[in-house]
Amino acid sequence: MQEAAIDASLDTKNVFSSALRFAMSIDTLKNSPELVDELKTSAQEQVEFMLSEDEEVRLLISEEEVKSVVRLGISNVISTLLDRLSSLLIFLPECPEFGLLKTLYDIEWLCKVLPRMELMKDLVFKWADVSSEILMIAQNCKLDSQILGVKVKLVEVTGKILEAVGYGIVIVPSKSRTCLLKIWLPFIRRLKTLVDAEGSESEYRMDEDLCEFIEGSMVSLVLTLPSNDQAEVFGEWMRGIGLEGVKFPDLSEAFEVWCYRSKSAKRRLLEKCDRLAGENLDR
């Protein structure tokens, strides 16, 4: 009985690990792209099902061997994204967005399953490390209108990263949190202006739900920062309003909280100084 149970557990582990490797394109087949994509989609669905329904899998995800597979998949998909972005600076294909969007959809899928595996932090830290590199290419002027759909999807993925950090799903040092906001805030603001300029008939849109999601994630994230870092973010935000007239994202709620806290802190500091001064006079 015990041997049968061990064999069953090994079978579950092998199936789950294999599904993970295909879902994250670590393993692939030398078939037509359509068949490869179909297999990857099926593997992703299998992983989601096993995470939700299989008790053994919930125990397996704590094993280092399984974690190593996931971390390899995260590194691979981020490397693929950077390679495909970089290639656009050398050669711009007829449909430049196709491969990039597929990769971003894979990252979006990771954002859905990694929290269940307690590995979202690996993607968050990786995304923080490569954000500057991603934006250096994405903001290249010759690609402005060529990859608008990719830029919108970049914002959607980044929103999930900001949400994970802002709501405490992933604990990130304050310096990294500040960098994430300062790097992505100007890009998101400019993209909203660019997309709005395309008009309501454009296929690319940052709809109300996405905008509210981004704003909510940013407000939560700003409120986790030290006061001085908050001041820097609010300075960048207000410059955008003053120079470009762009109010998105609306950080006024977080700004009001910061103002209140700053005034309260200043008042407490003055009260403490007055009390210490009084004590010195009494001596």
Image (cartoon, rainbow, N blue to C red):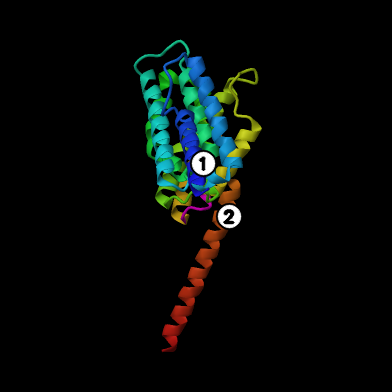
Kindly identify which residue carries mark 1.
8
- Percent coordinates x, y for residue 193 in the rendering: 55, 28
Q: Is residue 72 magenta?
A: no
Q: Tag 2: Cα neighbours inside 10 Å, few (<14), some, or many (≥20)? A: few
Q: Is residue 34 above or below residue 69?
A: above
The residue sitting at 61% across, 49% down in the picture is 253
Cα–Cα span, label 1 and label 2 = 54 Å
Residue 248 horizontal side relative to residue 60, left or right: right
Q: Which residues are magenta?
A: 222-226
Which residue is at the far front? 1
Q: Is residue 139 visible?
A: no
Instruction: Check the picture and name the quadrant holding the C terminus.
Output: bottom left
Q: Is residue 224 magenta?
A: yes
Using the rendered view, name the quadrant where residue 121 is placed: top left
- Percent coordinates x, y for residue 229 in the rendering: 44, 51
Nearer to us in this view, 229 or 235:
229
Q: How many marks?
A: 2
Q: Which mark is residue 257?
A: 2
Most frequent secondary structure within the magenta stretch? loop
**Kind of residue at disc 1:** Ala
The residue sitting at 46% across, 36% down in the picture is 14
The residue sitting at 52% across, 51% down in the picture is 168
The residue sitting at 60% across, 39% down in the picture is 213
Q: Is residue 163 visible?
A: yes
Label 2 residue SS: helix
**Kind of residue at disc 2:** Val
Which residue is at the far bottom? 283
Residue 208 horizontal side relative to residue 235, left or right: right
Which residue is at the far left? 90
- Percent coordinates x, y for residue 97 in the rendering: 48, 19
Using the rendered view, name the quadrant where residue 282 is placed: bottom left
Nearer to us in this view, 65 or 109:
65
